[in-house]
């Protein structure tokens, strides 16, 4: 069966510090991968998605970047965090193909102080 | 991106039916989904409907799709306190992109 992992579960970082959140998927190959942010009291915002190694599409201009160094690894990064980067970050994966339900990881709660 | 809209809050009494509504803008959507998010957790898929269907029923859940009006709804029969959560609708468009609504926070009153 497939599983998706995210870490850390919670993170408190000062403004201006770097960020690295990691997401890995097991039990499948060549998945589509997604990063979402859920700000407090708001809905989900798609930040990045990837259809393959090294292929990253960005949905919104922002202070964050994403990388996919391996087939089942998706990393969300920032060089300098802003207060507005606080939120709940969710990684998701889906199969390639016509019907591709998304499966979500447990999320990382990031607080920038 | 596409617009997917939901009302933010809904309160119902335990045992009543809940209806959560969603509207979307992209007429080329292929699948539409309902996800449930419990506090502090990720999203779990509840059900989905293919865009050429009008209705899908799955136990206590009924999904209605009006493709002409681009309106999707989720009905939860006999709502229980464990149904309290945030419910997101989402549409899948061509190019493997998903667009989520803002979420509806359902509160079930005992």
Image (tube, helix red, strand yellow):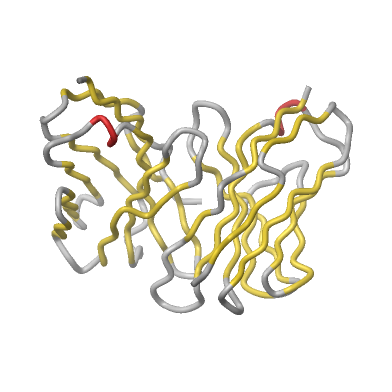
* In this view, A23 is above or below A62: below
Please tell me which residue is depicted at 61% across the width and 78% down the height of the picture.
Answer: A30
Rendered image quadrant of residue B36: top left
Rendered image quadrant of residue A16: top right
* In this view, B10 is above or below A109: above
Marker count (numbered): 0
Q: Please give left or right for residue A61 compared with residue A2 in the image.
A: right
Q: Position of residue A112 (x, y in %)?
A: 76, 27
Q: Position of residue A98 (x, y in %)?
A: 41, 77
Foreground pick, A39 / B86: B86
Please tell me which residue is depicted at 64% across the width and 66% down the height of the picture.
Answer: A50
Please tell me which residue is depicted at 18% across the width and 37% down the height of the picture.
Answer: B19
* In this view, B86 is above or below A64: above
Rendered image quadrant of residue A53: bottom right
Q: Position of residue A59 (x, y in %)?
A: 62, 53
Q: Please give left or right for residue B106 compared with residue A58 in the image.
A: left
Please tell me which residue is depicted at 37% across the width and 56% down the height of the picture.
Answer: B26
Quadrant of the image for the C terminus of chain B? top left
Foreground pick, A24 / A15: A24
Q: Position of residue B89 (x, y in %)?
A: 35, 47
Q: Please give left or right for residue A14 compared with residue A43 in the image.
A: right
């Amino acid at each position: 069966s497939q599983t998706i992992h995210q870490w850390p579960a919670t993170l408190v970082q000062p403004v201006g510090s770097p960020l690295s959140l990691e997401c890995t998927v097991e039990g499948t190959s060549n998945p589509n991968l997604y990063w979402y942010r859920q700000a407090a009291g708001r809905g989900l915002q798609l930040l990045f998605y990837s259809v393959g190694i090294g292929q990253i599409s960005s949905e919104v201009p922002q202070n964050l970047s994403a990388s996919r160094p391996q087939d089942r690894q998706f990393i969300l990064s920032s060089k300098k965090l802003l207060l507005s980067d606080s939120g709940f970050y969710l990684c998701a994966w889906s199969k390639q193909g016509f019907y591709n339900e998304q499966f979500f990881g447990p999320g990382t709660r990031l607080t920038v102080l | 991106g596409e617009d997917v809209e939901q009302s933010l809050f809904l309160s119902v009494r335990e045992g009543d039916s809940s209806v959560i509504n969603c509207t979307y803008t992209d007429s080329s959507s292929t699948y539409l989904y309902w996800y449930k998010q419990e506090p502090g957790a990720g999203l779990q898929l509840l059900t989905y409907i293919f865009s050429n269907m009008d209705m899908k029923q799955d136990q206590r859940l009924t999904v209605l799709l009006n493709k002409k009006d681009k309106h999707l709804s989720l009905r939860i029969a006999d709502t229980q306190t464990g149904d309290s959560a945030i419910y997101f609708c989402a549409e899948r468009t061509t190019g493997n992109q998903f667009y989520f609504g803002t979420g509806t926070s359902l509160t079930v009153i005992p």
